[in-house]
Image: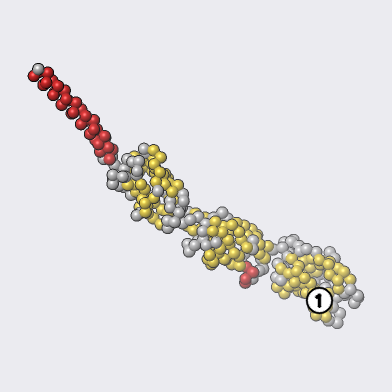
Amino acid sequence: MRKTLRALIFAFSISLAGTASAADLPKRINKGFQAQPIAILSVIPAQAEPGVKVTLSGSGFGENSVVFLGSVEVATRVVGEKQIEFNVPPKLEAGLYALYVKRSDGTTGRSYNFTVLPVRPVLSSLQPGRISVCAAGKDREVIASGSHFGSTTILFFNGAALGSTLISPESISFTVPTVPGGLYHVLVKNAPENSSVPLTLVVETRPEIGYVTVGGEHVNYYELTISGTNFNQNSSLYVDGVQIGGRGGQDMVDREKLIYIDCTKLIYQRHPYSPVNKDFRLQVVNPGGEGSQVITVSAP
């Protein structure tokens, strides 16, 4: 009887010891995991704009690990035991931040430098998209429209930084420099690492006749004032297909003469053989061969 009682007490004691060890096992396993240090092996990308997804690879991440950028706690997604993700907060200011991971047990990993870039600017239109090569003053001003413009935004004209005026986060004004005719790229940057898609600005050299008026009248000739744009000092005037002027304004046909005033005005000295009005066609052609539209004038 006594032997049987002793055996029961011994078995019960063994059972209690086994239960205690099993209950204590999760704590030991959890304690062992928490002792593992946090190690970040890669940060991709190492710099990004607000809103961009960033992936951290490494070890020691827990299910409730959180990423910090400086003092800012960032919403974090645990992808697996060795990978977590986050998106750069949309309103985070550009600058250099200490990036680190903090586990739920309070363990904090080593910090790494992470650069938050200014938001990439968007350039959507240029108004106007074409200007005359001889435009001056306000006529050379262009409004660049888009989004995400700010105090750090720099406008580039054909690869060179150009002075500009910030009107709003959606518009910037600039004056087109004096350049030959052709196609030019315009883009904006908020940082050296990010820029907008470039747009094309056309600087036109093709002459265009706006209107023709009768000017001063003299004994045996009168003047026709040709107003327009992109006239050249060596432009020629074709009257019914006959060239007048060119080569610096030298006379080409009899006493007919073309006088260059500026890029918007030419004076054609016409010597009519009759005072009766007649129709004739005019066209201005620049030295490079670019010609204006042909217009019909009714005059002596």
Asked if one can make out residue 161 in the rendered structure from this viewpoint, the answer is no
Asked if residue 4 can be seen in this view, the reply is yes
- The quarter of the picture where the N terminus appears is top left
- Which residue corresponds to mark 1? 214
Taking the view exactly as shown, the residue that stands out farthest to the front is: 1
57 versus 253 height, above or below: above
Q: Amino acid at mark 1?
A: Val
Q: Between residues 224 and 92, which one lies in front from this camera angle?
A: 92
Residue situated furthest bottom in the rendering:
219
Residue sitting nearer the eye, 21 or 83: 21
Q: Quadrant of residue 33?
A: top left
Tell me if mark 1 has few (under 14), some (14-19) or many (20+) residues whose alpha carbon lies within 10 angstroms of its own.
few
Colour setup of the view:
secondary structure
Residue at left offset 26%, top offset 40%: 35
Q: Could you tell whether 220 is left or right of 94 in the image?
A: right
In the image, residue 235 lies at what x, y percent? 74, 67
**In the visual, does 3 lie left or right of 130?**
left
| Horizontal side, residue 196 vs residue 272: left or right | left
Q: SS at mark 1?
A: strand
Q: In the rendering, at what x and y percent does residue 193 appear?
A: 48, 54
Location of the C terminus (image quadrant): bottom right
Residue at x 71%, y 68% (from the top left corner): 229
Q: Residue at x 58, y 55 (%)?
A: 198
Residue that lies at the very extreme toward the left in this rendered image: 2
**Residue at 46% in and 56% down:** 118
Where residue 139 appears, as percent x and y from the top left, is: 64, 69
